[in-house]
Amino acid sequence: MKKLFAAAALAGTALTSVPVMAQETQSVEDQVAALAAEVARLNQRVAELEAEQVQAEAQQADLAMERAAMAAEVVQLRESIPAAAVAAPAPATTTKWAGAPEFETEGGWSFKPFGRLNIDAGTINAPASAGRPDGFGSEIRRARLGFSGDIPGGFGYKIEVDFAGDEVAVTDALITYDDGPLTLTVGQHNNFQSLEELTSSRWSSFMERAAFTDAFGFERRLGVSAQVDVTDTILLQAGVFTDNIADIPGDTWSGDARIVASPKMGETQLHFGGSVHYTDVADGDTVRYRQRPLVHFTSERFINTGNIGADSEIGLGLETAIISGPFHAVGEAFWQKANRADALMGDANFFGGYAEVGMFLTPGDRRGYKGGKFDRTRPANPVDEGGIGAIQINARYDYLDLSDSAAGIIGGTQNGYFASLAWVPTDYTRLTFNYGRLQYDDAVYATGAGERDYSVDVLGMRAQIDF
């Protein structure tokens, strides 16, 4: 009976557990199905991401190809454009001071303003009976402003205008080209007349140049010229010129040439030069030779040839100078011939020249020299550095003969005895004091007693700055 109850219990237990196992099996299957669905979704997402990555990589490859193509095109364009056309940074500009600012660029451009101011005063004492105005006089002798500079390629330029007096006058207006020892110049400039004329008025020993330079009409003219530095000590200059720019248009023309030898012996500078000039005078024009008494503020000329009918002029000049320490000496001679338009009257011959010596009294100072002419004096102990500047004394004999009796011209003769004291406080300032005694023979103005041989005394002073 017990066995019967046990068997029945086991059977009942088995019957009640079957539904439970069935439920558990169903739950596991559902979970497996859900997991499989999630795996499938993830696989699909991975496939999508892989597809997107492939597309992105393809786009990057296309972009890289486009960039490479653009870079190649840029290189090709750069190679096809001349180097000068490729944009480059603006060259740096440097500024330096030498009396005035000078601006320069690495590309070869430069620009420098410059100027000078001469203020003169003095007195003239002539025989009262000659009836000529004398006494005190003054003027602004020069008031010039200009600029100069360089242009890439060896070119240069210079323009200067003088505002002194009643008119504005162009002094220099020129373009240059430099190629090694050769310099070509076109425009208004000096035509190589003499050492005295070519030396700037800024550092001349006296207020005015030697008498023959003005008497024979030396001036800047419009033309073209060449200068060649044959060696360090040999200089050749030559050119063809027309009238001064203020007299254009005109039919006068000239051919001018000069040679200079400037050897050095130790610290001693020597100068030897010569020049020749031919001027073809325009038909109907005349020439006239005359000169003031040392200073410019007077309009009186005590020697004067008057107008001479001439069809041409020939000039010949000789130059010599020496600079040795504080001492200098210089002398020039110039012969001027006027070929008369009327052959029956005979050609007229005139002469001028001077001899000068000078000495600096301050130690370490000497006269400057460069390029076949005198140059700036730079005081060894300038005032702006606590010194007294440079002090120089000079003496000059100045001769001018404007008479040719054989040609029937009596213009007078000058024997000038001059002395000067120059004080140069700094590189760009200067005070000059002049005294001159001029002895005239055959002066154009007679005294009350009919005398034409007499003397005129002159005192003059100049205050000068330049930059």
Image (tube, rainbow, N blue to C red):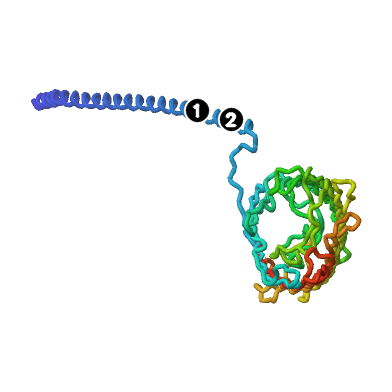
The picture places residue 377, in percent across and down from the top left corner, at 74, 67
Q: Amino acid at mark 2?
A: Ala
Q: Secondary structure at mark 2?
A: helix
Mark number for residue 21? none
Cα distance between the residues tagged 2 and 1: 16 Å
**Residue 418 appears in the rendering:** no
The picture places residue 260, in percent across and down from the top left corner, at 86, 55
Task: Name the residue nearer the viewer: 392 or 168.
Answer: 168
**Residue 264 appears in the rendering:** yes
Position of the N terminus by quadrant: top left
Q: Amino acid at mark 1?
A: Ala
Q: Residue furthest left?
A: 1
Q: Residues within 10 Å of mark 1 (few under 14, many from 20)?
A: few
Q: Is residue 34 left or right of residue 44?
A: left
Q: Residue furthest front?
A: 449
Mark number for residue 72? 2
Q: Are marks 2 and 1 in contact (CB under 8 Å)?
A: no
Q: Earlier in the sequence, mark 2 or mark 1?
A: 1
Q: Give the residue number, with chain letter if any, for mark 1.
A: 61
Query: Depth-wise, is mark 2 or mark 1 nearer the camera?
Result: 2
Q: Is residue 390 left or right of residue 114?
A: right
The picture places residue 50, in percent across and down from the top left corner, at 41, 27
Task: Name the residue nearer the viewer: 293 or 145.
Answer: 293
Q: Quadrant of residue 280?
A: top right
Q: Residues within 10 Å of mark 2 (few under 14, many from 20)?
A: few
Instruction: Name the residue: 91% across, 56% down.
Output: 406
Q: Quadrant of residue 432?
A: bottom right
Q: Secondary structure at mark 1?
A: helix
Say if 19 sits above or below 374 in the image: above
Say if 270 sits above or below 242 in the image: below
Say if 195 sits above or below 71 in the image: below
